[in-house]
Image: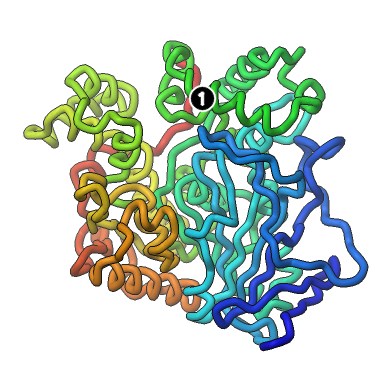
Amino acid sequence: MSEQPKVRTTEGVVQGLWRQGHAVFRGIPYAQPPVGALRFAAPAPPRRWEGTRQAVEFGPVVPLSLPIDVPPQGTDWLTLDVGTPDPGAAGLPVLVWIPVGGYLSAASSDPMYDPAALAEAGVVVVTINCRVGAEGFAFLDDVPPNRGFLDQIAALEWVQRNIAAFGGDPGRVTVGGVSAGAGSVAALLTMKSARGLFRRAIAHSVPGLHSTPALARQVTAAFADRLGAAAPTAEALRDIDPWRLAAELTSFNAGLHSHRESWGRLTETGTALCPVVDGEILPETPWPALTAARASGTELLVGHTRDEFRYFSVVSGRYGTFTEKDADAALALHAPQPDGTRAYRAAFPQADSEELVETVYSDALFRMPSQKLAEANAAAGGTSYLFELCWVAPALGGILGACHSLDVPLAFGTLGSPVGTQLIGEEPTPEAVALSRELQEAWVRFVTTGDPGWPAHRPGGHLTRVLDTESKTLPYPEQASRQIWEGHSPAPFDLS
């Protein structure tokens, strides 16, 4: 392995590097940089190159609309990375990971997504960058909506053209993601332009984040007005620096509560610009599309953590402070109406204000969208495997519980990454290592065979793999919440 690995793609030759027994290729363009005349446009096919392109550095981070300081690194944002056990192999299963968070960030370079452990297990891992925030999801009058999804489809098309050259099987592609990445996966299940680009799907903590065109148009108009733009159009925004646009969106998101009367539930998400159910690129939300068989089911591994909302309440400093007024507001905004408020209080009679807030937010934002996606996919003829992570994160004395994103470093085997350390601690316990191995083996089995190793989640039985120090397959643990949400799909945010 002294000679660095080379692969010929349809656009040209790339040279990567050997790392921990597998080959990695980084920063490969799957579309042209979306700047200048291409800004806010659908992704354009990548240009070819002569000679050998060095693929040893991650591509530039896309502009992030998060309260963190990441300096601009260039504009070649639409790139992907490949980790493969052997570029000379053939027929290996492929995982395409969409590292999108909150529809505000996407960084394939995050150490949490290091492919080393999965590559060692025989999986080719592709991690993609795509547009997020205003670049990817602002609802502008003169360009396609949901450009972030179009980027993901362009990356999946690149995989179909090229992954065999890296040892992968284009007929055994699994697309996966967590949080907004899982929301992206759910959307791809329903999009005609994504058909045939993947065989299986993994979705951890699926969010119900979608807007109607009416709401999206008003939100984007308010954002454009904040920027001093003449109109909510690509032409009016094109000359604004992308990183300034991202920073302005960060501030705009922080002030969403001031619009609660007109924008309703959206103002509680911290994400003003999310996918739009535009009727064409995204014809409808995934749940009714699959339930009514307007989209085909697939082999789906989907799940959530038990304490989804806990991470957000701790990080925001609200943990332990929620009042009865907060509980009333949470139920009014997020419980399925007209009877959801009464149903929650009846189902959880001993719950205090803190528990009610956490339960309804966890349900509305992640748990019920995930569980209902499993049911909808089965209704569409697919096979769904459901899990719930109940193992408590050891960090901070355990107050994080089984929180949002805890499952990802476990599945990737990246317990020593910054996020893994934040949630699990500097020295992972034997229980953490064992659970990581269990979830990782389930992933490898699923992307290889379509079966993670436990019974499918079917109507009536609702069998679920409960991941803990001693994992078990049981009826769905959140049965009370499931019954409250019976007959209610996560609805797009709309004008109040």
Residue at point 46% right, 52% down?
178
- The x and y percentages for residue 373 are 41, 50
Q: Residue furthest right?
A: 50
- The x and y percentages for residue 63 are 65, 39
Q: Can residue 25 be seen from the camera position used here? A: yes
Q: Along the line of sight, which residue is nearer the eye, 457 or 421?
A: 421
Please determine whether, in this image, residue 124 is positioned above or below residue 48.
below
Q: Residue furthest left?
A: 350
Q: Secondary structure at mark 1?
A: helix
Residue at point 38% right, 72% down?
442
- The x and y percentages for residue 423 are 33, 53
Residue identifier under label 1: 253
- Count of numbered labels shown in the rendering: 1
Q: Say which quadrant the N terminus sits in.
A: bottom right
Please determine whether, in this image, residue 185 is positioned above or below residue 440.
above
Whether residue 319 sits left or right of residue 21 in the image: it is left
Question: Label 1 sits on what residue type?
Answer: Asn
Whether residue 301 sits left or right of residue 80 in the image: it is left
Residue at point 25% right, 28% down?
340
Please determine whether, in this image, residue 207 is positioned above or below residue 13.
above
Residue at point 28% right, 25% down?
330
Residue 7 occupies quadrant: bottom right
Q: Along the line of sight, which residue is nearer the eye, 393 or 100?
A: 393
- The x and y percentages for residue 348 are 12, 35
